[in-house]
């Protein structure tokens, strides 16, 4: 009888005060969350939040944070985003940017992630977040081929260190707006710190090869229009200048070939460079490898 009276009293108390259910809901929801039962956690947290809102109760931020994470786990992206946006109104929650951005990245929502980083940029003070912000802004703008934005972010990064991939994205952005000289300098700077970075070596090798090849074809076309002793002397002089770029391309492609001996593209470039430099024996060796 005593136990029955206690249960009845509890039931009456709960009926009179709906908020009395909150501690139990929170405990059960958190247990489900900690155990990875996100469906159950989502349902209980939603009930908690609705009950608290309906009764004008102050919501514990930890509830909203866990529910945001739960929504992300269950691919309820829009609901999670709404919760993260609400939480980020408090600058003390700025670290939630990491989880929020990762969720958007995993969902392939590039525009939303880019907007998020731009909107929150001024609030970011901690070095780790500044580095992540810079990386993601460069990567996202590079994906969208927004070259000027990539350049702006990289050149205004201050003391923030970036990955070699971000640095190469800057090189490609400069090339994308036809600032080839600046791009080549940036690539050389990158290779000073990452001398064996294959993608950067490939960019450098192709840059100097194309630069030399374009000038070579121009000079040969000019000479063929007016063949005489004087124009031939000028041609030899100009080809000697061009050979400097061919040699840079050759040396870089040799390194790339050593790094990836099965790469046929490197062999083809080397064969052509050797021919331009009158290294016929070496060109023949590349030709054998290509057969």
Image: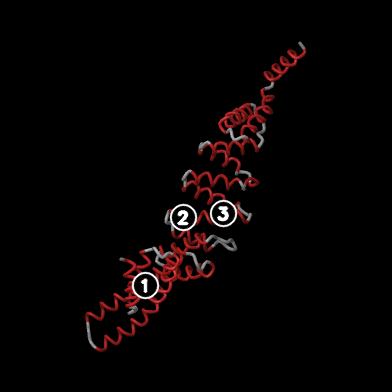
Residue 18 location, quadrant: top right
* Residue in front for this viewpoint, 225 or 251: 251
Q: Residue at x 69, y 20 (%)?
A: 14
Disc sitting over residue 132 in the figure: 3
Residue beneath label 2, please?
141
The first of marks 3 and 1 along the sequence is: 3
The number of numbered discs placed on residues in the rendered structure image is 3
Residues under numbered marks 3 and 1 in contact, where contact means CB atoms less than 8 Å apart:
no
Taking the view exactly as shown, the residue that stands out farthest to the top is: 1
- Residue 205: x and y in percent read 41, 69
Element under label 2?
helix
- Residue 21: x and y in percent read 67, 25
Q: Is residue 67 above or below residue 257?
A: above
Mark pair 2, 3: CA separation: 14 Å
Element under label 3?
helix
> How is the model colour-coded?
secondary structure
Q: Is residue 166 above or below residue 268?
A: above
- Residue 155: x and y in percent read 52, 64
Residues under numbered marks 2 and 3 in contact, where contact means CB atoms less than 8 Å apart:
no
The first of marks 2 and 1 along the sequence is: 2
The quadrant in which the N terminus is found is top right
Disc sitting over residue 211 in the figure: 1
* Numbered disc in front, either 2 or 3: 3
- Residue 173: x and y in percent read 44, 62
Disc 1 crowd rating (10 Å Cα; few below 14, some 14-19, many 20+) is some
The quadrant in which the C terminus is found is bottom left
Left or right: 118 in relation to 219? right
The first of marks 2 and 3 along the sequence is: 3
Disc sitting over residue 3 in the figure: none
Left or right: 7 in relation to 242? right
Q: Residue at x 42, y 56 (%)?
A: 145
Left or right: 286 in relation to 201? left
């Amino acid at each position: 009888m005593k136990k029955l009276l206690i249960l009845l009293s509890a039931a009456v108390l709960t009926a009179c005060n709906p908020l009395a259910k909150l501690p139990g809901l929170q405990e059960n929801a958190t247990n489900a969350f900690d155990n990875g039962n996100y469906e159950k956690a989502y349902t209980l947290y939603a009930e908690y939040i609705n009950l608290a809102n309906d009764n004008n109760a102050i919501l514990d931020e930890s509830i909203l944070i866990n529910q945001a994470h739960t929504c992300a786990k269950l691919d309820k992206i829009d609901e999670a985003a709404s919760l993260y946006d609400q939480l980020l109104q408090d600058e003390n929650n700025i670290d939630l940017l990491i989880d929020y951005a990762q969720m958007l990245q995993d969902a392939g929502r590039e525009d939303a992630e880019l907007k998020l980083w731009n909107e929150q940029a001024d609030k970011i003070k901690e070095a780790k977040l500044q580095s992540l912000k810079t990386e993601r802004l460069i990567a996202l703008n590079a994906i969208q081929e927004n070259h000027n934005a990539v350049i702006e972010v990289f050149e205004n990064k201050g003391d923030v260190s970036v990955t070699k991939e971000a640095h190469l994205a800057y090189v490609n952005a400069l090339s994308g707006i036809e600032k080839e000289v600046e791009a080549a300098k940036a690539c050389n700077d990158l290779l000073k710190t990452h001398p064996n970075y294959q993608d950067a070596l490939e960019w450098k090798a192709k840059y100097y090869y194309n630069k030399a090849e374009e000038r070579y074809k121009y000079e040969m076309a000019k000479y063929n229009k007016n063949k005489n002793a004087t124009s031939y002397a000028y041609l030899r002089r100009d080809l000697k200048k061009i050979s400097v770029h061919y040699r840079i391309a050759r040396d870089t492609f040799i390194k790339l070939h050593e790094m990836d001996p099965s790469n046929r593209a490197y062999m083809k470039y080397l064969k052509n460079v050797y021919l331009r430099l009158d290294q016929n024996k070496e060109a023949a060796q590349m030709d054998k490898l290509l057969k």
